[in-house]
Amino acid sequence: MTTYSIDTFKPQRTCWHTLNRSTPDYRDMLPLPHAVPPKDRPLVLDFLAQRKGASPLQISRLDYGRCVGGYRTRVLEWLYHLAGVLAPAQLISLRAELYPDDDPMPSLPAVQFRELGASMWQSVTFPALFDNYPADFYLSFSAEVEESGVVVRPEAHLARVGPEAITGPLEGLAFVDEAMEQAQLRWQRFCDESCHWLLDCGITHMEIKGSTATVSRR
């Protein structure tokens, strides 16, 4: 299989399956600009797991958009650790803008990722609701600068139950809506507690795919 290197359009012998980690590896996470410090100009990291015809991760300059090298190892290492603290959920996409900054920023404690996993994809609630059909759901985080300041928007939505893709509300299944409301509240709490870290990382968008298929059946 042809895969691609991290910050170029040229085919390389690089395997991205290592980012799909099935077993959690909880650890404190440094903010991204400390793990990947930009030297002079701001950087943009744009990761999309299913990007077609190009590298899953594009690294460019914020001011003129040209791809740059020299950061791939540190970026990959940080993404690998992030995939570990989110496992068995998968990192689907991430966009971050990194600015040169010497101010110290704290790491996000591993316990916060552990609590997220326990309340979401390791919970037995969803398998019980869907009668042992595996269900996929997406959690997203976005941050935008508006007149009132930085506005963050965490969202959760159901994507699939068994073989059926879900594209809208499920008519008459109030218990499913209630479950997704609980998922939204749990994800909202994680984002609220981690907001400073997410913003320190320069993350403007992030999406995670969780699945009840990772939960042991009883």
Image (tube, rainbow, N blue to C red):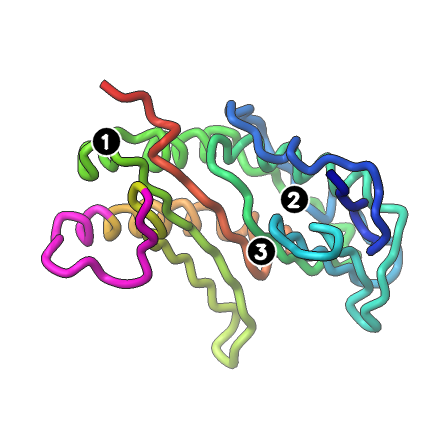
* Residue bearing mark 2: 31
Q: Nearer the viewer, residue 138 or 163?
A: 163
Tell me: residue 146, above or below residue 60.
Answer: below
Q: Position of residue 146 (x, y in %)?
A: 52, 77
Q: Magenta stretch? A: 163-179
47 lies left or right of 194 = right
User: Furthest residue to the bottom?
Assistant: 147
Q: Which mark is residue 199?
A: 3
Closer to the camera in the image, 71 or 143: 71
Q: Which residue is mark 1?
A: 132
Within 10 angstroms of label 1, few (less than 14), some, or many (20 or more) residues? some
As helix, strand or loop, the secondary structure at mark 3 comes to helix
Is 174 colored magenta in this rendering? Answer: yes
| C-alpha gap between disc 1 and disc 2 | 38 Å
The reply to whether dot 3 and dot 2 touch (C-beta < 8 Å) is no
Q: Decide if residue 101 is on the left or right side of residue 24.
A: right
Label 2 crowd (10 A; few <14 / some 14-19 / many >=20): many
Residues packed near mark 3 inside 10 Å, few (<14), some (14 to 19) or many (20 plus):
some
Percent from the top left, x then y, of residue 3? 75, 43
